[in-house]
Image (cartoon, helix red, strand yellow):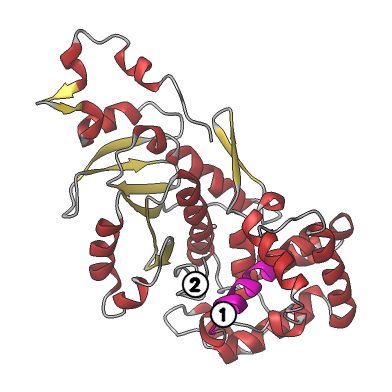
Amino acid sequence: MMKSCEITMTTIRLSIISSVFVLLLTGCEGPQADRVGGTPKLATPVGMAEYLKDLPAVRKVEPWSDEYAPGITITTEHYDIHTTLLDPLMLRQVPGFVESAYRGYQSQLPEPIDTKTRLTIYLFGSRQEWEDFTKKFVGRQWRAYMKIKKGAYYLNGACVAYNIGRKKTFSVIAHEGWHQFNSRHFAYRLPSWLDEGIATLFETSRYDKGRFYFEPHKNGGRLGGLRRTILTENMIPLKKLISLNPGYVIDDRGSVLAFYSQAYALVRFLREEDYGKRLGNYQNLLMAGLRGEWPLEPELRRIAADRNIPLTARFNAFVSSKLFSLYIGQDIEQIEAEYIAFCKKSVYRVRLAK
């Protein structure tokens, strides 16, 4: 359920085509062909739409009429992207990036799911446009979202971001995009550690030959946070970690970073450790949440399914602990010992900046 990385329980997570302007000039009849009324063609929605329309991931591009700035709507197979960002070098990679992320979300499941309705992304060119939109989109709680320094949020079915540089912008869109994906398609909302842990897997990516590849093992921010947590002996015990709802029970930045880095490590541990011996358990937990098959009492199932009901810390703690025991294992002390060993192994070569 998106919320911003640290505000809504979810904390805050390429190659440049050097010949683009040469390509733009190819076939032009004269120096005025790239200008509209004295304005560079690519600085206009019409010009940008023309520039992007033939990209492989793009289904359709058209001008977007909004009150914040001139923009365009890019339609891909799974997304409608409304954007006021008119940076050609960055924007030409956005359609392929979000579709790569969508494939990554599907890969968390043992089999892909059939989806029909496109997801919505708002990508603004400036912080001011993002703030103006957020004040109207969020409603009375908009002030809380202003505390987001550099990030994005998921709310009301949409992922809302603004340009903070290509690498960071893509990172937060992919993180929030996971919340958007599972909120749309899963029958039940996921425990916080699982939801946030999976989202961090998409914060680091590599661009190669027109596609993006996500590389969780190279997520320097989470690995650095994990290393620091271990060195300062501030590891959150596993039993507590899986019961935490960071938006409600953690009130200092250090503990929030510890939660996210450990949730990141826990999801990787379940997927990777000992040649993926718990991968099946992990996927069974997700598939049962997707299909609405968690073996919970009727009232708990109702709360898990109804996203209009506030997710309380008490509910998250109880359900998360029960699901972990049912799907991952009851011997939490043994699992924790293996988990800690995995964490230490993962950060063995990580060096912190002084």
The residue under the point 25% across, 70% down is 135
Does the magenta-highlighted stretch encompass residue 223? no
16 above or below 155? above
Magenta part of the chain: 251-263
Query: Looking at the picture, how far across and down is residue 185, in whole percent?
Result: 52, 62
Q: Give the mark nearer the N terminus: 1 vs 2.
A: 2
Q: Residue 44 versus residue 224: which sits nearer the camera?
A: 224
Q: Nearer the viewer, residue 57 or 151?
A: 151
In the image, 51 versus 11, the foreground residue is 11
The numbered disc on residue 246 is 1
Question: Quarter-wise, where is residue 274 in the image?
Answer: bottom right
Q: Which residue is mark 2?
A: 6
Q: Is residue 54 left or right of residue 195?
A: left
SS under mark 1: helix
| Residue 290 shows in this picture | no
Residue 280 in the image: state x and y as whole percent.
80, 62
Q: Are marks 1 and 2 in contact (CB under 8 Å)?
A: yes
Q: Quadrant of residue 255?
A: bottom right
Vertical side of 68 occupied by 210: above or below: above
| Amino acid found under the numbered disc labelled 2 | Glu
